[in-house]
């Protein structure tokens, strides 16, 4: 943050000066029609529609780790929620009327994976598994894996993308090797996998890569994994035609970082 929507709203995070209201000092704000509006902040004891007033949403002195939103003023964010002095990681979604704490298979969500599309859907992790939801029921995305990943132990990562039809590009690791899969609305398709040498066998790194910058290839740029950079319906890794693009990198034949034979390649594909 800050970023803007198609309708001209601007979202940003900011500190505010505490004026005796407990320990709150950080919030997410929206500028609309020239007016600054509070979306949420970490002051204890505030009343947020749909949430108990005893919650503190966010840690004092810390920014919210991830925020996603759309042009209909729906918002999802990662936050540490403190209730009765006990903190827990959570993902909250505002559906236009109320805030909801997202869950997958009755497990509280912990990470935001993608941006938010025009329907208010967002991809998140709960119990380490990926789900998609608009604040209602959540759809599990790992229930129908591609044959290449059957039986594999996958660690799902942030840095995905979602389009307006609810299809999603997801990142994962298995045995320390990176991969990427496409959710078609019914099943997952393998897009790229270092261990499976797909789509080609001569690369070692799959981007976007989690910040900080890549440890192995200095010359490789980094696409941020923050969901507010996944501009659903606008500019993202996955567009509304189910087309996607991603980059790979390798150290080259000398297997040494930041040398002349380091290289990158850009792939473009489509889910069918």
Image: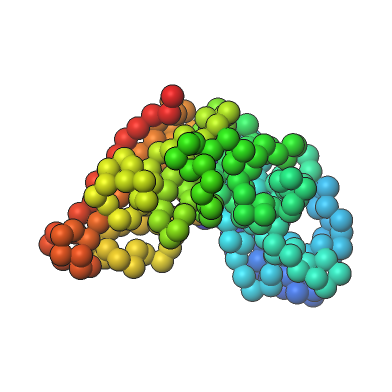
**Relative to 154, does residue 164 appear above or below in the rendering?**
above
Give the image's coloring scheme. rainbow
Mark count: 0
**Residue that appears at 83% across and 52% down:** 51
Residue 209 x/y as whole percent: 40, 56
Left or right of 44, for residue 248: left
Of 138 and 6, the residue lying toward us: 138
**Residue that appears at 27% across and 43% down:** 200
Left or right of 31, for residue 194: left
- Answer whether residue 44 is visible to the viewer in this image: no
The residue lying furthest to the left in this view is: 260
The residue lying furthest to the front in this view is: 151
**Relative to 99, does residue 134 appear above or below in the rendering?**
above
* Residue 271 occupies quadrant: top left
Residue 260 x/y as whole percent: 12, 62
Residue 270 x/y as whole percent: 39, 29
**Residue that appears at 15% across and 60% down:** 253
* Residue 269 occupies quadrant: top left
**Relative to 126, does residue 83 appear above or below in the rendering?**
below
* Residue 263 occupies quadrant: bottom left
**Residue that appears at 67% across and 52% down:** 126
Quadrant location of the C terminus? top left
Of 21 and 94, the residue lying toward us: 94
Of 65 and 125, the residue lying toward us: 125
Left or right of 70, for residue 218: left
- Answer whether residue 151 is visible to the viewer in this image: yes
């Amino acid at each position: 943050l800050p970023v803007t929507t198609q309708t001209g709203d601007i979202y940003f995070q900011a500190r505010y000066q505490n004026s005796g209201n407990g320990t709150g000092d950080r919030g997410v704000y929206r500028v609309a029609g020239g007016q600054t509006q509070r979306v949420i902040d970490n002051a204890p004891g505030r009343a947020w529609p749909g949430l108990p007033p005893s919650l503190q949403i966010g840690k004092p002195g810390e920014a919210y780790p991830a925020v996603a939103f759309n042009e209909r003023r729906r918002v999802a964010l990662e936050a540490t929620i403190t209730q009765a002095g006990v903190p827990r990681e959570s993902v909250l979604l505002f559906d236009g009327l109320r805030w909801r704490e997202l869950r997958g298979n009755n497990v509280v969500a912990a990470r935001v994976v993608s941006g938010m599309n025009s329907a208010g859907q967002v991809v998140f992790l709960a119990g380490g598994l990926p789900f998609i939801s608009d604040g209602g029921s959540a759809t599990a995305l790992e229930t129908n894996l591609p044959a290449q990943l059957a039986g594999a132990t996958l660690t799902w990562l942030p840095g995905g993308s979602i389009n307006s039809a609810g299809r999603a590009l997801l990142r994962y690791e298995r045995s320390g090797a990176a991969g990427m899969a496409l959710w078609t609305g019914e099943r997952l398709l393998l897009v790229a996998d270092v261990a499976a040498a797909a789509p080609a066998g001569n690369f070692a790194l799959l981007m976007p890569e989690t910040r900080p910058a890549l440890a192995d290839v200095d010359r490789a740029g980094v696409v941020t994994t923050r969901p507010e950079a996944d501009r659903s319906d606008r500019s993202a890794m996955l567009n509304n035609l189910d087309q996607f693009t991603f980059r790979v990198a390798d150290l080259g034949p000398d297997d040494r970082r930041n040398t002349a034979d380091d290289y990158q390649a850009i792939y473009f594909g489509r889910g069918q």
